Image: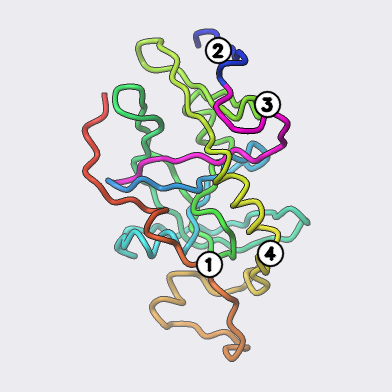
Amino acid sequence: MPPITFIDEDFKGVDSSQDDPMVISIDIDNFTIMKTLVDQGSLVDILYWKTFKAKRIPIEEMTPYDDHVVGFLGERVGTTEYIKLDTTFGLNKASKTLKIKYLVIDANTSYNIMLGRSSLNKLGAIVSTQHLAMKFPSLSGDIFTIQVDQKIARECYAKTLRVEPTRQKIVGSQSPRRKMLGRERSPRRDVQPAEQAVAMIDLDSRNVKPRL
């Protein structure tokens, strides 16, 4: 891997005195998906159910997955499906496209996707929270940079503090696939968690030019 360094000019935010989350935009199947959280503390990559539905991906494209994700408080969250999607990091020629395996999880969150160490290592990315930037090498050895939109990052964090947790998504809970197909019902079907809507501005459908 070529050497990757950060300088003061890599910071493109509005407030350098910050501890903001790494929130970027990525492209998946002709959609630019904003509010993508880069979480180096997570091993897996997560596509949230609300985003899956907004993209209108055929549910048949998901693959069964029998394992669990351990949450921040040590709770084990059931995951029953995953999907592999071509994901583009960066813009135009300064980009790289990889096939990323996303676990599909139904959770109340202000983010659309969470990228963990699995995709970051595959990308060869180095993250600098101080500069709110992420750099990764191209196949030719050039270094590409993705900057955080600090305003969106702060908005997401503020909304996260107000989001109610999805309490029933624990071991033995129904999968997104089963909930959609109506094959399973929650014992407390009269109580439904508030689901965060995905705004159209978060999923920008457009013709994405072929990546080099």
What residue is drawn where x is 38% and y is 78%? 181
Disc ID at residue 4? 2
Q: CA distance from mark 1 to mark 3?
A: 29 Å
What residue is drawn where x is 40% and y is 52%? 83
**Which is nearer the N-term, disc 2 or disc 4?**
2
Q: Quadrant of residue 121?
A: top right
Q: Secondary structure at mark 2?
A: loop
| Magenta stretch bounds | 11-29
**Residue 27, magenta (yes or no):** yes
Q: Is 69 placed above or below 185 here?
A: above
Q: Residues within 10 Å of mark 4 (few under 14, many from 20)?
A: few
Q: Is residue 69 left or right of residue 197?
A: right
Disc ID at residue 130? 3
**In this view, the mark in front (2 or 4):** 4
The residue wearing badge 1 is: 196
Amino acid type of disc 3? Gln
Q: What's the magenta bit mostly, secondary-structure-wise?
A: loop
Q: Residues within 10 Å of mark 2 (few under 14, many from 20)?
A: some
